[in-house]
Amino acid sequence: MVKVVKFGGSSLASAEQFKKAAAIIKAEDDRKYVVPSAPGKRRSGDTKVTDMLYQTYDIAEKNGNYSKELAAIKARYDEIIKGLGMDFSLDDEFKIIDEKFKEKAGVDYAASRGEYLNGRIMSAYLGYEFVDAAEVIRFDEDGVFDSSATGTLMRKRLSDCERAVIPGFYGAYANGRVKTFSRGGSDITGSIVAGAIRADVYENWTDVSGFMVADPRIIDNPESIDTITYRELRELAYMGASVLHEEAIFPVRKEGIPINIRNTNAPEASGTWIVESTCQKPKYVITGIAGKKGFCSVNIEKELMNSEIGFGRKVLQAFEDYGLSFEHVPSGIDTLTVFVHQDEFMDKEQQVVSAIHRLADPDTVDIEADIALIAVVGRGMKSTRGTAGRIFSALAHANVNVKMIDQGSSELNIIIGVANQDFETAIKAIYDIFVTAAL
Ligand code: ASP
């Protein structure tokens, strides 16, 4: 069995955390390929090394003197090296970084050094080979991740090393110029490595014991999710549940490889399994609840709309023309409502309204702001009667008015629109009826 193990920034923020990560790696012989993040926050109020690198490079780019800032970054690594009792120095690496900053090697190069240097320490500490991500992760000329070139490079390079450390977050163009993924991108690297070598499991070690049924900022100590499907995760992640980078599921999903989210500070907890499909029954009827505030509804009415073929297309054309993506489009006989992100819509609202008039000739267009959308997600809903009934009675008892309901035909999720100010109350009511009441 081969496992790819990725450790997040908080799991590698100090020597103490490094030791925990190393103990986890050494505890199982299958943990052969390690993907480290850059050192994250050691405590609240601390700064991530990646942010320090961005700030330092910003000074370099403006031809300022950044020596103090670069020394502070070096001190973060030296503290780790010292705490690990290693005879190891990054002095030469920092000389190179300083030169590259002077040459203005680019902001991506700068940011990538966080992972690169942590990877260097990790490889020396574990005695695993170091494989620079710039050698094995490829972007095409347009800056798009090149999955096929990467797969070939990765498989070739890793075929002759049994164990290796591959830093997260970056890769390179064919000419060697470094490029990073978006923030939090080490999750993607771990998934790419696992997918390329067709590992058995991708373990993603972080500082929480997996996915929670609901946001812990809203629900005190929410239950965690044992097993979630990729599809369920996608729904929840889209609606704001974040533990893993959104794009991290694709490389492993393609190969049918499960992801196991684990907690570096509680390695005994089995965490959350993210799988393609499972016969395991979820603990509760619902797998998770997530939501976001800040949507707007654009309600369009027209007499006999229902008999006008192409009306919906014309309305959506108005949104497309202004580069707006829509979230949901519930419709009635003579009404159609389009939900959009309020912050994206606000500046363009009057243009969009006139475009709707021009293109679709409706009777009225009415806008309502400050709406929250909540997704209640669960593969268990499919075979259970009365889920929607329970949700709406719980909301009624909590005095929450429901503005919109949308259930996809997959029966995997029910989306509910409520006023922003009812958001937290609604989530609590749904959590209580399905989880607290079942405990
Ligand atoms: N270090 C990078 C960041 O802070 C990437 C990562 O941690 O995944 O975004």
Image: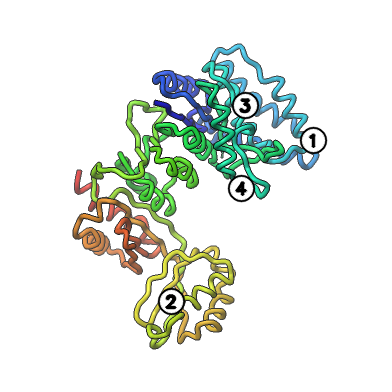
Which of marks 4 and 2 precedes in the sequence?
4
Three-letter amino acid code at disc 3? Leu
Instruction: Please name the residue that numbered disc 3 is placed on.
Output: 117
Quadrant showing the C terminus: top left
The image position of residue 77, as x and y in percent, is: 61, 24
Quadrant showing the N terminus: top left
Is 354 placed above or below 248 here? Answer: below
CA gap, disc 2 to disc 4? 37 Å
Instruction: Please name the residue that numbered disc 2 is placed on.
Output: 299
CA gap, disc 3 to disc 1? 19 Å
Residue at image point 47% right, 75% down: 367
The image position of residue 255, as x and y in percent, is: 43, 40
CA gap, disc 1 to disc 2? 54 Å
Tag nearer the camera, 4 or 1 = 4
Please report contact status of discs 4 and 1: CB closer than 8 Å, yes or no. Answer: no
Tag nearer the camera, 1 or 2 = 1
Please report contact status of discs 2 and 4: CB closer than 8 Å, yes or no. Answer: no
Q: Secondary structure at mark 3?
A: helix
- Residue 60 in which image quadrant: top right
Please report contact status of discs 3 and 4: CB closer than 8 Å, yes or no. Answer: no
Please report contact status of discs 3 and 1: CB closer than 8 Å, yes or no. Answer: no
Instruction: Please name the residue that numbered disc 4 is placed on.
Output: 144
CA gap, disc 4 to disc 1? 25 Å
Mark seen at residue 103: 1
Residue 55 appearing in the image: no
The image position of residue 291, as x and y in percent, is: 39, 55
Please report contact status of discs 1 and 2: CB closer than 8 Å, yes or no. Answer: no
Three-letter amino acid code at disc 2? Asn
